[in-house]
């Protein structure tokens, strides 16, 4: 073997390792894209990293009247007329009603059971009897269930500026 053959083999090895490295990099990038493709976006663009489970919200809101959060959870119920609100279970028989900032986007009607990550403002709000009845009607409750709503409720609510819905 002469020196030329040795250089050629080394050059060939370097080229092969470079190609292998580029292929591996492309494969990893495609993995990120496929993960990203598992989410549908609504409203502001947000990431899923750093989200707090919605069950922790009541504790995080102690002593506060309003605060911004990135939360994760599972949609329990969604407006069946337009998708203009959803509810998430916070545990201890508490549901978090979520509306959407500036009424700018809606969730798919069939989104109950879907995992989500959302960002926005949590606050306490008094929901009027009229609004509670409207939500009950949107949720498909019976006339008797709607008529049984006679008192306003003070509840923890959330206004989402962005939502990611897991497909």
Image (cartoon, grey):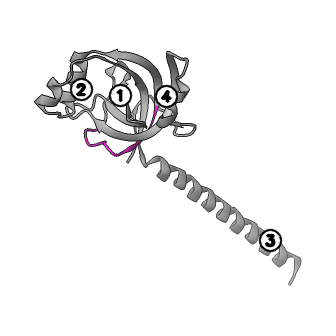
| For residue 154, side relative to residue 65 (left or right) | left
Nearest to the observer: residue 9 or residue 134: 134
Give the residues drawn in magenta, as a range.
108-118
Q: Which residue is mark 4?
A: 58
Coordinates of residue 152 in the picture (x, y in percent): 28, 16
Principal secondary structure, stretch drawn in magenta: loop
C-alpha gap between disc 3 and disc 1: 65 Å
Q: Which numbered disc flags the more N-terminal residue, 3 or 2?
A: 3
Circles 3, 1 touching at the beta carbon (< 8 Å)? no
Q: Which numbered disc flags the more N-terminal residue, 2 or 4?
A: 4
4 vs 3, front mark: 4
Circles 2, 4 touching at the beta carbon (< 8 Å)? no
Q: Which mark is residue 70?
A: none
3 vs 2, front mark: 2
C-alpha gap between disc 2 and disc 1: 10 Å
Coordinates of residue 75 in the picture (x, y in percent): 36, 40
Q: Residue drawn at (24%, 26%), measured in percent from left and top?
A: 135
Q: Residues within 10 Å of mark 4 (few under 14, many from 20)?
A: some
Is label 4 in a helix, a strand or a loop? Answer: helix
C-alpha gap between disc 3 and disc 2: 71 Å
Coordinates of residue 101 in the picture (x, y in percent): 38, 21
Q: Residues within 10 Å of mark 3 (few under 14, many from 20)?
A: few
Q: Which residue is mark 3?
A: 10
Circles 2, 1 touching at the beta carbon (< 8 Å)? yes
Which quadrant of the rendered structure holds the N terminus? bottom right
C-alpha gap between disc 4 and disc 3: 63 Å
Q: Residues within 10 Å of mark 2 (few under 14, many from 20)?
A: many
């Amino acid at each position: 073997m002469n020196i030329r053959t040795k250089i050629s083999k080394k050059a060939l090895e370097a080229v092969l390792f470079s190609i292998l490295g580029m292929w591996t990099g492309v494969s990893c990038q495609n993995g990120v894209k496929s993960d990203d493709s598992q989410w549908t976006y609504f409203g502001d663009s947000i990431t899923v990293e750093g989200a707090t489970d919605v069950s922790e919200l009541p504790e995080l809101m102690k002593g506060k009247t309003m605060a911004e959060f990135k939360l994760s959870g599972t949609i329990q119920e969604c407006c069946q007329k337009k998708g203009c609100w959803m509810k998430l279970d916070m545990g201890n028989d508490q549901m978090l009603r979520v509306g959407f900032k500036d009424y700018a986007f809606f969730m798919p009607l069939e989104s109950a059971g879907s995992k989500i990550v959302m960002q926005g403002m949590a606050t306490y709000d008094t929901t009027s009897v009229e609004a509670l009845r409207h939500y009950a009607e949107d949720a498909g409750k019976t006339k008797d269930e709607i008529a049984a709503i006679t008192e306003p409720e003070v509840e923890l609510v959330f206004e989402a500026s962005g939502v990611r819905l897991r497909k």
